[in-house]
Amino acid sequence: MKRIVKAAALVGVVALLASPLAAKKVKWKLAETWPSTLTPLASPPLKLAQYVKEMSDGKFIIKVEGKEKHKAPLGILDMVKGGQYQMGHSGSYYWKGKDINTVWFTTVPFGMTPSEQYAWFYYGNGMKYMKEVYDKFGVMNFPGGNTGNQMGGWFRKEINSVDDLKGLKMRIPGLAGEVLAKLGVNVTNIPAGELYTSLDRGTIDALEWVGPGMDIKMGFHKVAPYYYTGWHEPASEMQFLVNKKAYNKLPDNFKAILVTAMKAAAFDMYVENFAESVKAWDKMKKDFPNIKVKHFPKPVIGAMRKAATEVYESYAAKNPKFKEIYEDYTSYMKKARAWSQMMQGGYLNLDK
Ligand code: CA
């Protein structure tokens, strides 16, 4: 009898040592590109911190610091690499000046939709390439929440032809800006806080932001009536960055908790942003019935597509890794799109 009790006690001790309860307390810090109130972009880090704390029984704590605290919104990669922060939340395409291949993990003009891109990340080669591209920074990259297909932006005047793009002053960042510059657009970069006034005063003729859920807070619909559908950011995925050394020091169960919580928090943002846009668009179209939703005319889209291909091909000619990912991405997209058109396209066209 005694022996049985002893054995049971020993099993209990072993179980305790292996459980999260026995692990040392871990305290991490996460820096995000956004002000900590800018939901839904600021939501994934907060949800991640909450999930990690609950799943670890309070033993793994992540403190989230917004842009207002660290004052380096575009310094996130450097700060995670240097170890000042164990984690970051940002957008991979902000690091295109450090490595052009980081763009593949956010979105690209005329690229995949969120479901196509998630399939590429998790069941194609996306995560493999993420690892290859971020390894040299000593940082790990994980999907961190998707905005869904972004709107093409707010325009003061209608765009009827490629000629209407010439000399147009527009705020549009990233590769899409490079594409439009090829078509004669005067691409400018204006801080977020000055965008509304610039559009209102005609300092710029057009701008793109995200979609109704985030655009409504900026008020662009009050000063520019044409709301164009998107082509340039079809699936913008945010990113979680993790310092590799810090990750490797975590006990295995904390690693599993972190990876699972990042995935759950990322999914939440996609849904939250969709729901915000449902609500905002319903309100916007009621309050401002003059908003005209437009698709760019076919010849304009054709010219943009051609310019985008030229941009991709010029990077591919200079950068072998870009060429490799570009080929993998486009071949996956071709197969994925055939299914999307049949499944989603078919269904959405039932009512047309
Ligand atoms: Ca955007």
Image (spheres, rainbow, N blue to C red):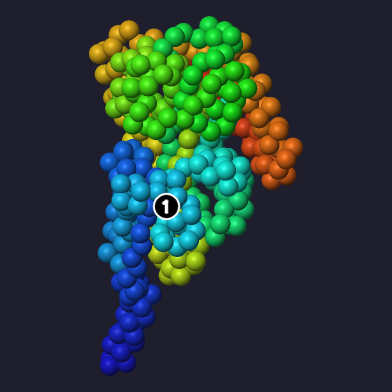
Give residue 339's quadrant in the image.
top right
Crowding at dot 1, Cα within 10 Å, few <14 / some 14-19 / many 20+, comes out as: many
Of residues 203 and 223, the one nearer the viewer is 203
Q: Is residue 45 visible?
A: no
Residue 219 falls left or right of residue 104: left
Of residues 231 and 15, the one nearer the viewer is 231
Give residue 38's quadrant in the image.
top left
Q: Residue at left 73%, top 40%?
A: 318
Residue 265 falls left or right of residue 184: left
* Residue 171 point in image, percent of width and height: 46, 25
Looking at this view, name the residue that lies furthest to the bottom: 2
Looking at mark 1, is its residue's CB closer than 8 Å to ligand 1? no
The secondary structure type at the circle numbered 1 is: strand
- Count every numbered label the image shows and give the total: 1
Q: Residue at left 55%, top 19%?
A: 185
Looking at this view, name the residue that lies furthest to the right: 317
Q: Residue at left 71%, top 43%?
A: 319
Residue picked out by circle 1: 88
Name the amino acid type tagged 1: Gly
Which of the image's four quarters has the N terminus? Answer: bottom left
Q: Is 138 drawn above or below residue 178 in the view shown?
A: below
* Residue 29 point in image, percent of width and height: 35, 59
Residue 302 falls left or right of residue 143: right
Q: Is residue 6 visible?
A: yes
* Residue 178 point in image, percent of width and height: 59, 28
Of residues 324 and 332, the one nearer the viewer is 324
Residue 134 falls left or right of residue 274: right
